[in-house]
Image: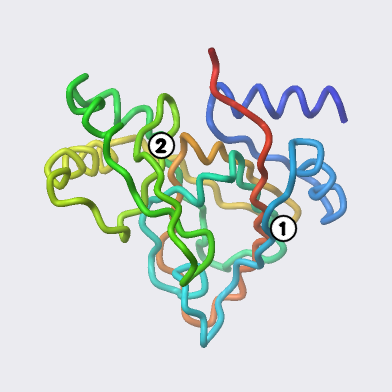
């Protein structure tokens, strides 16, 4: 486990994401516990009365999750029969397209991070060193609308990594660096991922 964990953390640090194969739920949870502290567990599947985007079949735009999670893990229990791929973009690529002045301005933009739907917002810098927190549905302060618009253009032009997990595969992502999303799936899709938020593993390279 120690060697595999070293390889996994190295991949997260260099590429921002890592896929692992042939994992049962117990082995998946063991990796998550070895990486840090699991602070949230969620079944990602469609629900008729669901209120969040991950419970609905329409496409999910690129975003990061709550900033308390350094790492997000998804373990595939069932996959959509035609697609269901997780889509990733590297925020560092988008930031590299911006001027130093734009990056400095983004570091002064605060976004309201909501850990739970309807909960109290946790004011979080959009850019904090190497860390990025962004979701397109969150309100942007009016003075920052133009620079955030330029960031969106950079994200739209960044390379998209497509990871269509098979049952038993897991995807681990650096939530401070990679934005994730998904294309639309059918209303009756049986796609089912087990998501874990993991805290306590600093991944930024010095």
What's the residue at 24%, 25% (across, down)?
A: 104
Q: Residue furthest bottom?
A: 49
Whole-percent x, y for residue 4 in the image: 80, 28
Q: Residues within 10 Å of mark 2 (few under 14, many from 20)?
A: many
Q: Residue 105 appears in which quarter of the rendering?
A: top left
Residue 97, above or below 160: above
Residue assigned mark 1:
167
Residue 144, above or below 84: above
Residue assigned mark 2:
132
What's the residue at 57%, 40% (across, down)?
A: 173
Give the colouring mode of the picture: rainbow
Q: Residue 129 appears in which quarter of the rendering?
A: top left
Disc 2, SS:
strand
Left or right placement of residue 163 versus residue 131 in this view: right
The earlier-in-sequence mark between 1 and 2 is 2
Whole-percent x, y for residue 194 in the image: 68, 60
Whole-percent x, y for residue 198 in the image: 67, 45
């Amino acid at each position: 486990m120690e060697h595999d964990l070293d390889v996994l953390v190295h991949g997260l640090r260099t590429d921002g994401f890592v896929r692992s194969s042939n994992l049962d739920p117990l082995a998946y949870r063991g990796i998550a516990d070895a990486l840090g502290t699991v602070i949230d567990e969620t079944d990602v599947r469609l629900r008729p009365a669901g209120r969040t985007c991950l419970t609905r079949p329409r496409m999910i735009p690129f975003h990061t999750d709550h900033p308390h999670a350094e790492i997000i893990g998804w373990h595939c229990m069932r996959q959509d029969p035609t697609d269901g791929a997780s889509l990733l973009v590297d925020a560092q690529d988008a930031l590299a397209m911006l001027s130093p002045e734009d990056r400095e301005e983004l570091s002064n933009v605060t976004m309201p991070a909501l850990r739970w739907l309807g909960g109290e917002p946790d004011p979080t810098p959009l850019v904090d060193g190497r860390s990025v927190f962004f979701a397109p549905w969150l309100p942007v302060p009016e003075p920052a609308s133009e620079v955030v618009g330029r960031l969106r253009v950079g994200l739209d032009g960044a390379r998209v990594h497509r990871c269509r997990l098979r049952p038993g595969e897991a995807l681990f992502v650096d939530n401070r660096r990679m934005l994730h999303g998904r294309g639309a799936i059918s209303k009756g899709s049986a796609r089912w991922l087990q998501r874990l938020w993991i805290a306590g593993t600093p991944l930024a390279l010095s």
